[in-house]
Image (tube, helix red, strand yellow):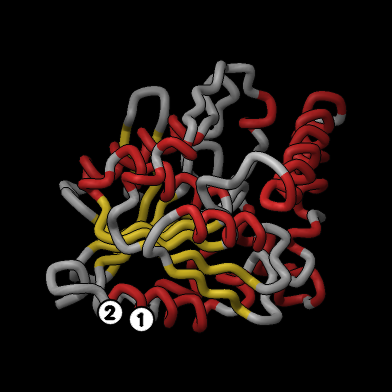
C-alpha cells in the first residue's frame, strides 16, 4: 500500500497511467474511491494520482492533528515532493476544491491547471455569495457537537444524511457508492482541538494565473459560491451542469471525466498531454 510517512501523519495515495500528472482531491469525509468512475477515462492520457486527505480513508485519523486548509496544502506539497512532481494539474471536489484553490494561490508555480468542482475560493463574505456556507458551517458544528456528546459513529451517520448527498440516497446504488466513498472517515477532525491556521484567499486571487475552471451542478447549494469565485478570477471558466447536485463526480462520472479531459487537452503545448 503506497503510503507517505510524514511523521505523525501517514498519507495514502494511488497512482495509475502515464503522462502529465493530474492529482484528484476528494471532498470532506470522502476517500480515493470517490474518483473511481472518473479515473479510467483520464489514465489513458495522464498519470492520475489520488490520495486520502488527513482524517479520511486510509490516511491517518488522529484528533491530535491540525485540521485546516493550510495543513491540507502542506500535505499536498509533501505528496508532490515525494513523487518528484514539479508541477501538476489539480482537480478537487468540495473541500478538495478549496484545498486545490488555496494550494494554487500559495504555490502557483507548481500548478499546470486548476479544476474546482462544487466549491471554490474565494467564497465571498456576505450576501448571496455566502448564503449556503453559513448553513454548512452550522451543519459542521452540529456534527461536532454530536461527535462530542454521542460519539463519532453518530456524527458520521448524521453527516451521511446531509442534503449534499441527497441525490445519491435516492437509489440503492447511490447509497452503496456513498458508503464506499466514506469508508475510513472516523470524525477525528471533529474531535480535534488543535489550533487551526487560516488564510485570507480574497487577497490571493491575483496569483491564480494558471488556467482555472469551476464545475458545479445546477442544483448544488454551493453554486453561488462557484459563480462568485468565477467572477473574482479573471479568465476563469464556469461550467454549470443542469440537473446535477453537489456529488456530481459520483452522480455523473463520465461527464466530469470528459469535462476535465477536454479542459486540459485544450491548453497550450506543455500543459496538456502533448
**Residue 191 locus on image (x, y percent):** 68, 25
- How many marks overall? 2
Please determine whether, in this image, residue 233 is positioned above or below residue 76.
below
Please determine whether, in this image, residue 239 is positioned above or below residue 131.
below
**Label 1 belongs to which residue?**
262
73 on left or right of 215: left
Nearest the eye: 29 or 233:
233
Which residue sits furthest right? 150
Task: State the residue at coordinates (32%, 63%).
Answer: 211
The quadrant of the picture occupied by the C terminus is: bottom left
**Residue 176 locus on image (x, y percent):** 70, 69
Residue 182 falls in image quadrant: bottom right
**Residue 36 locus on image (x, y percent):** 49, 70
Residue 194 falls in image quadrant: top right
Residues packed near mark 2 inside 10 Å, few (<14), some (14 to 19) or many (20 plus):
few
Q: Are the residues at dot 2 and dot 1 in contact (C-beta closer than 8 Å)?
A: yes
Amino acid at each position: 500500500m503506497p503510503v507517505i510517512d510524514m511523521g505523525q501523519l501517514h498519507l495514502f495515495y494511488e497512482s495509475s497511467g502515464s503522462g502529465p500528472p493530474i492529482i484528484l482531491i476528494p471532498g470532506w469525509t470522502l476517500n480515493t474511491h470517490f474518483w473511481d468512475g472518473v479515473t479510467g477515462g483520464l489514465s489513458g492520457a495522464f498519470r492520475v494520482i489520488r490520495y486520502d486527505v488527513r482524517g479520511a480513508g486510509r490516511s491517518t485519523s488522529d484528533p491530535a492533528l491540525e485540521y485546516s486548509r493550510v495543513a491540507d496544502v502542506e500535505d499536498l506539497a509533501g505528496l508532490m515532493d515525494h513523487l518528484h512532481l514539479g508541477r501538476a494539474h489539480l482537480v478537487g471536489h468540495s473541500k478538495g476544491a478549496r484545498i486545490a484553490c488555496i494550494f494554487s494561490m500559495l504555490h502557483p508555480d507548481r500548478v499546470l491547471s486548476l479544476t474546482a468542482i462544487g466549491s471554490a475560493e474565494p467564497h465571498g463574505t456576505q450576501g448571496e455569495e455566502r448564503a449556503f456556507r453559513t448553513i454548512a458551517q452550522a451543519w459542521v458544528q452540529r456534527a461536532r457537537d454530536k461527535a462530542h456528546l454521542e460519539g463519532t459513529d453518530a456524527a458520521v451517520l448524521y453527516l451521511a444524511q446531509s442534503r449534499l448527498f441527497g441525490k445519491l440516497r435516492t437509489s440503492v446504488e447511490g447509497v452503496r457508492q456513498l458508503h464506499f466513498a466514506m469508508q475510513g472517515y472516523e470524525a477525528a477532525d471533529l474531535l480535534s482541538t488543535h489550533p487551526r491556521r487560516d488564510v485570507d484567499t480574497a487577497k490571493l486571487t491575483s496569483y491564480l494565473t494558471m488556467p482555472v475552471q469551476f464545475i458545479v451542478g445546477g442544483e448544488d447549494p454551493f453554486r453561488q459560491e462557484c459563480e462568485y469565485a468565477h467572477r473574482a478570477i479573471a479568465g476563469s471558466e464556469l461550467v454549470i451542469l443542469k440537473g446535477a447536485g453537489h456529488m456530481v463526480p459520483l452522480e455523473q462520472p463520465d461527464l466530469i471525466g470528459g469535462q476535465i479531459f477536454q479542459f486540459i487537452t485544450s491548453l497550450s503545448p506543455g500543459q496538456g498531454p502533448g
